[in-house]
């Protein structure tokens, strides 16, 4: 059976869609017979029962370690709520982050794959968290078990420890709640898109409940390998359980577990040609363009992620609590991906294009404990936070062994002989079969931290924030040149706030961050100075429409010293000695009118290299310098402007229509640490590889009854060819999906 994009649909998904559609028809008939006018009181009760968000506007966050209203935090925060992601039919964290202004995507290369973003022009690969606990493993995250996603912008080491300058991306898990509520949904769409989700919550006693979330999703896209007809695919599933006891009492306990599994066919995109994404006709008459995929069904990106967390909160009083989290996590992943070629068409035997392979196992044990209270000292009000953190890391990573596609036997050749044999006989790799050459990268570390923060009301309406943290890292590596690391650093956070009234907040803030030489496996022949950053921000936050509409703006400068390479195996670890981003942001979220809701962001970024890189030659130990012409040039993958808008309007009681746009300016890719910039200059002008700016338009239409709903989402309505990710060294880019229509049926009981 065929549907939409001429793709086979699994019988399971067809049966599910038929059953859901049939039940929808019955529900419509039942509603016609028994429908009653919707009562405003029911809407108010529902809103009161969902304190975390008010539609697209967040009203609570724990990204600052304690539960706060984002309006009161002296730092820019973007929150993606569950309602926003629901209306957009979002499945992955990557897709969710399209709503964050000033954020761009990196294509996977250089030993790093999975979720890989830039925020305010800086990497975020060490700044992804789950419920405030470090979640920096290289894997692809899903949103089926997320309540919201908080993006705290700017340096944030005082709150989270080592990290980058752009900010922190914190995923907030769904947890058990004191109600009986169940939602199941089934979706079908073009390019073999099918998804099933279930969210089941059961109240067990007056203070205990259990919650189960499940997900199964699969999809392809329009790109194909003309030699074998294969396309990139996503195949992901997950299950999450949350048990809560003592909910709402002075002693609250949650035990949460989430497991996700992926089985993707990865896509590394298309090459550049003449400094632009490739679109060329070869002498043979064949055309290489955005639709040409270099991989096939034998490629794989398989991962198993298991995360268990216990959370205990003791509330001494309304304003005083002690909260402790203990987490054990295991991230297993293996992949083989094909990189593209700009001169030869792909082959059926995987002989054209490069091969990126990894086998990884990353295990962590994390303990966090926080004490927070409010008190008066010498006539001034204080909000005090203090805490301890311990993180144990144990990681292994190595490449995979190549096999002869013709004979099925492993290759024993190396170098040019291996390249020739692969060209003649093809190649494939197996998950878990490690390379016999090279040395595995191993990493074990113990991280310790202590922190304290105080928010002091100097005089009514004026607050002073002061925070300090001390981190200590002890690590052992497999590297013979950098076998150990013993490192300590202080981090600071401060801010001055003026709350003119309940609806307005003006602030100025300072924060910093650090990342030591060997953090995240980044090794150098001789220890280099740590990567550090500082952010100064001036901002304002306003509430309108009785608090139902939030608007914020922020003007900032972030400066990073000794910027590191994302290529974890690079011996030229330093990208730039100093660079900065100056930026201006605007964001709007909430209800413009009673039935009109909006989420929008606009970011302007001026990102420049201030001082070029200094590196140490891996063989001679001599200090080398990057080409001086890079000084003053725009930073990689940082457009001058980005814009996002999503808006919906409810009408006729049950109907909702919506749409939005995601736009990014031109982005560039090059190697800023190169000793010669000749290849990025044309006729004396700086001319690196460039991705054109784009604007993607999405739309939705929904009918939402009391116990069921049907929604149509159309992504990339105008069917525009665009490139949403660039390998920042400039080698290739990954096109976004073409127009895709998805219909979803949902039941609530």
Image (cartoon, grey):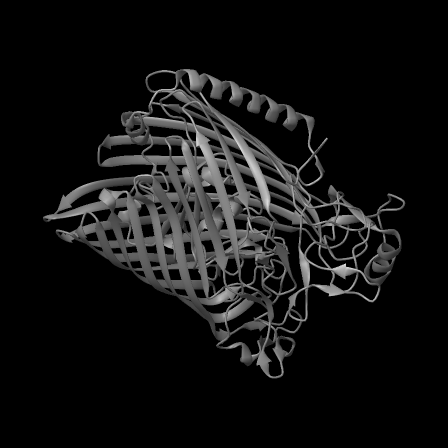
Q: Position of residue 616 (x, y in %)?
A: 59, 71
For residue 60, above or below residue 499: above
Residue at position x 31%, y 31% from top? Answer: 47
Left or right of 695, for residue 32? left
Left or right of 116, for residue 324? left
- 428 or 277, which lies in front? 277
For the view shown, which residue lies furthest in the left direction? 379
Left or right of 685, for residue 462? left
Q: Position of residue 205 (x, y in %)?
A: 36, 15
Residue at position x 55%, y 34% from top? Answer: 743
Q: Report which quarter residue 242 is drawn in.
A: top left
- 310 or 168, which lies in front? 168
Q: Position of residue 18 (x, y in %)?
A: 61, 24
For residue 23, above or below residue 557: above
Q: How many marks?
A: 0
Q: Position of residue 383 (x, y in %)?
A: 22, 45
On the question of residue 676 being in view, the answer is no
Question: Which corner quadrant holds the C terminus?
Answer: top left
For residue 728, above or below residue 366: below
For residue 101, above or below residue 141: below
- 701 or 232, which lies in front? 701
Q: Report which quarter residue 732 is drawn in.
A: bottom right
Question: Which corner quadrant holds the N terminus?
Answer: top right
On the question of residue 76 being in view, the answer is yes
- 107 or 428, which lies in front? 107
């Amino acid at each position: 059976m065929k549907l939409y994009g001429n793709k086979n649909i699994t019988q399971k998904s067809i049966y599910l869609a038929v059953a859901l559609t049939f039940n929808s028809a019955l529900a419509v008939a039942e509603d016609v017979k028994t429908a009653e006018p919707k009562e405003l009181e029911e809407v108010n009760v529902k809103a009161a029962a969902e304190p975390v968000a008010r539609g697209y506007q967040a009203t609570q966050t724990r990204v600052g370690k304690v539960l706060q209203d984002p309006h009161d935090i002296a730092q820019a925060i973007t929150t993606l709520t569950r309602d926003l992601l629901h209306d957009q039919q979002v499945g992955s964290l990557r897709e969710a982050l399209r709503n964050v202004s000033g954020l761009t995507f990196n294509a996977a290369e250089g030993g790093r794959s999975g979720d890989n973003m830039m925020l305010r022009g800086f990497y975020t690969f060490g700044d992804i968290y789950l419920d405030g606990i470090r979640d920096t493993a290289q894997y692809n995250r899903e949103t089926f078990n997320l309540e919201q996603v908080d993006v705290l912008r700017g340096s944030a080491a005082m709150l989270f420890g080592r990290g980058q300058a752009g900010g922190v991306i914190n995923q907030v898990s769904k947890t058990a709640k004191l109600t009986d509520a169940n939602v199941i949904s089934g979706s079908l769409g073009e390019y073999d898109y099918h998804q099933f989700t279930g969210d089941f919550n059961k109240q067990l006693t007056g203070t205990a409940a259990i919650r189960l979330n499940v997900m199964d999703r699969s999809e392809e896209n329009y790109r194909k390998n003309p030699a074998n007809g294969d396309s990139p695919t996503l195949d992901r599933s997950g299950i999450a359980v949350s048990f809560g006891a003592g909910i709402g009492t002075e002693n609250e306990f949650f035990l949460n577990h989430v497991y996700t599994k992926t089985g993707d066919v990865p896509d590394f995109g298309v090459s550049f040609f003449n400094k632009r994404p490739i679109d060329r006709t070869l002498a043979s008459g064949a055309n290489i363009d955005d639709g040409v995929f270099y991989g096939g069904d034998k490629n794989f990106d398989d991962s198993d992620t298991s995360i268990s967390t216990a959370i205990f909160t003791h509330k001494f009083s309304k304003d005083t609590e002690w909260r402790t989290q203990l987490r054990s996590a295991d991230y297993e992943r293996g992949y083989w991906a094909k990189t593209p070629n700009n001169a030869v068409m792909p082959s059926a035997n995987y002989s054209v294009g490069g091969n990126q392979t990894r086998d990884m196992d990353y295990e962590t044990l994390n303990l966090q404990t926080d004490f927070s209270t409010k008190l008066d000292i010498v006539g001034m009000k204080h909000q005090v936070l203090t805490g301890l953190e311990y993180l144990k890391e144990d990681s292994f990573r190595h490449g995979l062994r190549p096999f002869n596609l013709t004979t099925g036997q492993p290759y024993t050749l190396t170098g040019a002989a291996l390249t020739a044999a692969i060209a003649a006989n093809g190649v494939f790799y197996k998950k878990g079969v490690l390379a016999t050459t090279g040395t595995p990268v191993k990493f074990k570390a113990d991280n310790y931290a202590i922190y304290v923060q105080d928010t002091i009301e100097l005089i009514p309406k004026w607050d002073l924030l002061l925070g300090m943290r001390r981190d200590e890292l002890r690590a052992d590596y497999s590297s013979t040149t950098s076998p150990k690391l013993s490192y300590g650093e202080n981090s600071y956070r401060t801010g001055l706030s003026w709350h003119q009234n309940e609806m307005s907040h003006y602030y100025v803030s300072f924060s910093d961050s650090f990342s030591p030489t060997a953090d995240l496996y980044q090794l150098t022949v001789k220890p280099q100075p740590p990567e550090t950053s500082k952010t100064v921000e001036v901002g304002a936050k306003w509430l309108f429409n009785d608090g139902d509409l939030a608007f914020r703006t922020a003007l900032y400068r972030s400066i990073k010293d000794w910027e590191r390479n994302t290529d974890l195996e690079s011996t030229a670890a330093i990208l730039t000695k100093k660079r900065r981003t100056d930026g201006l942001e605007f964001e709007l979220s909430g209800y413009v009118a009673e039935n009109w809701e909006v989420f929008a962001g606009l970011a302007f970024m001026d990102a420049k290299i201030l001082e070029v890189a200094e590196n140490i030659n891996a063989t001679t130990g001599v200090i080398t310098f990057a080409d001086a012409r890079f000084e003053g040039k725009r930073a990689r993958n940082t457009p001058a402007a980005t814009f996002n808008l999503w808006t919906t309007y409810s009408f006729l009681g049950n109907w909702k229509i919506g749409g939005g746009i995601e736009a990014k300016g031109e982005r560039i890719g090059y190697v800023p640490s190169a000793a010669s910039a000749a290849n990025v200059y044309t006729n004396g002008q700086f001319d690196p590889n460039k991705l054109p700016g784009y604007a993607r338009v999405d739309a939705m239409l929904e009918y939402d009854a009391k116990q069921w709903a049907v929604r149509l989402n159309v992504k990339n309505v105008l069917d525009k060819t665009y490139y949403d990710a660039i390998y920042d060294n400039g080698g290739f880019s990954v096109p976004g999906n073409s127009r895709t229509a998805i219909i979803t049926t949902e039941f609530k009981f």
